[in-house]
Amino acid sequence: MKIKFVEVFKNKTMKRKKRIEERDFIIQNLLITEAGAEGVGIGKHEHVVVFVPYVVPGDIVDVQVFKKKKTYYEAKLLTINQYSENRVTPRCEHFGVCGGCKWQSMNYNMQLHYKRKQVIDNFQRLGGFDFPEVNPILPSDAIFAYRNKVEYTFSNKRWLQIEELPDADAGLINTNGLGFHLPGMFDKVLDINHCDLHSELGNRIRDAVKEYAIAHQLPFWNARTHEGFLRNLILRTSDCGDMMVIIILTSFNDKAEKLMSFIAEKFPQITSLLYVENTKMNDSVADLPTKIYHGNDFLQEKMGDLQFKIAPLAFYQTNSAQALKLYEQTARLADIKEHQTVYDLYTGTGTIALFVAQKAKKVIGIEYLQSAIESANENAILNNISNSHFFAGDMAYLFTKNFIAENGRPDVIITDPPRSGMHPKVIDNLLEIMPERIVYVSCNPATQARDIAMLTTKYTVKEVQPVDMFPHTQHVENIALLVANE
């Protein structure tokens, strides 16, 4: 039986839609054989690779090609002619539109298989170096409600379904929305009714804020004209039971005061109610002060035996339970001895550095943001850790021979860079310093493979351990142990 897939994306104009339909073609009974790193399914048509979102390996589908290149096509799903045995019913009502959980229709064991395969493929194709068999991926105990941070965007031009367009043109429906940006669209958000990735309390808070804002005619942000009042809503939770709510708005006035008062009264569970005034053209708020309306200006979090104070806008792993597994594996691979000095590059708020500090003689953490370093020092004091030292600065220019001379040569280096990977100067310095072991933690196996390929001139990859931090997405966290060649 053929199952029609709900077409969720509309073309900007009917003229453009007609032009695309005339140019494109239909591929029938395409067998999906793989799942790609970008969350798409992969099939082949006449020796050309075809990328299709929202399909599962084993599906047999009809698709419409909308982009043609010499070596690949991009297509949209039209019809599922035969279900894969690995397909499951997506739990989220927004699946297929939101784009945030592209693998939610794939059973979890198969998700884990393709995440591990993603690591192997990147190491083989992009890295080209020798490495041992990749360890089984560590699954997440919770595959829903695992995120401790979610950021929503206000928009007065929410994404409209096709059936809503006539009413919108006639001014009969409210076009305000609070939700997630649609892929590739900076000015449109999908209005979210329920997100399965964070807590029920978070869902209730989001809905209440949206309903209050619409009822009291608070202007939602327009990303094109840069007009409006409400811009973003950030929700953060902790395993200690804390709940932080941050409202980003253009100014704090009487309307803002009433909104904040409403939130505080309706949700006494909130331990930190904060706001940020942002009048900039972009949504970046890391450089703006966070102001307290009610409660604390931090989240209390725990990691094993350690306690952490997390600043409102500071980075912290968004899957707390899996973060503990990640750090335990990092510490295991680092194999730190009590006489050794450890450097933690891209230390953030010092979570990994403090996690391993009790095993080492001394730990040095380096991070770009001064505010993160201040949090790291505060957390060291909170946990009575005296052998950790944190420094703020650009990694490429701070992590030098002179810095090493002043702070001691590292025996072990742990590095957890952003998705873009390490700066070439950092890699050059690692090759010159030659620590005994390098433990490379990454959220992007592609840039990790690129960096490791440069390090393997003097290092050998001894172990590879992927960890699933983000169920239902294509993302995977990976740890690689490199040992200096004799």
Image: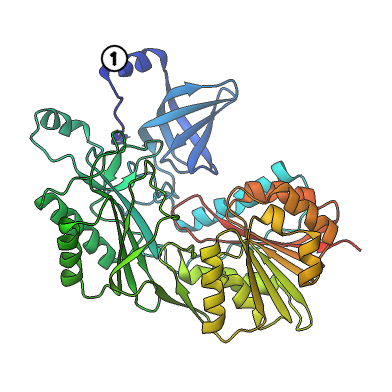
- Asked if residue 325 lies left or right of residue 339, the reply is left
Whether residue 345 is visible, yes or no, is yes
Figure check: 367 above or below 14: below
Q: Nearer the viewer, residue 172 or 251?
A: 251
Residue drawn at the location 9% of the way across and 52% of the way down: 215
- Asked if residue 486 lies left or right of residue 351, the reply is right
Q: Name the residue under label 1.
A: 15
Residue 124 at x, y = what percent? 72, 46
- Asked if residue 453 lies left or right of residue 382, the reply is right
Residue drawn at the location 48% of the way across and 40% of the way down: 40
Q: Nearer the viewer, residue 312 or 307?
A: 312
Residue drawn at the location 43% of the way across and 23% of the way down: 66
Residue 346 at x, y = what percent? 62, 61
- Asked if residue 265 lies left or right of residue 133, the reply is left
Figure check: 22 above or below 50: above
Residue 424 at x, y = what percent? 73, 47
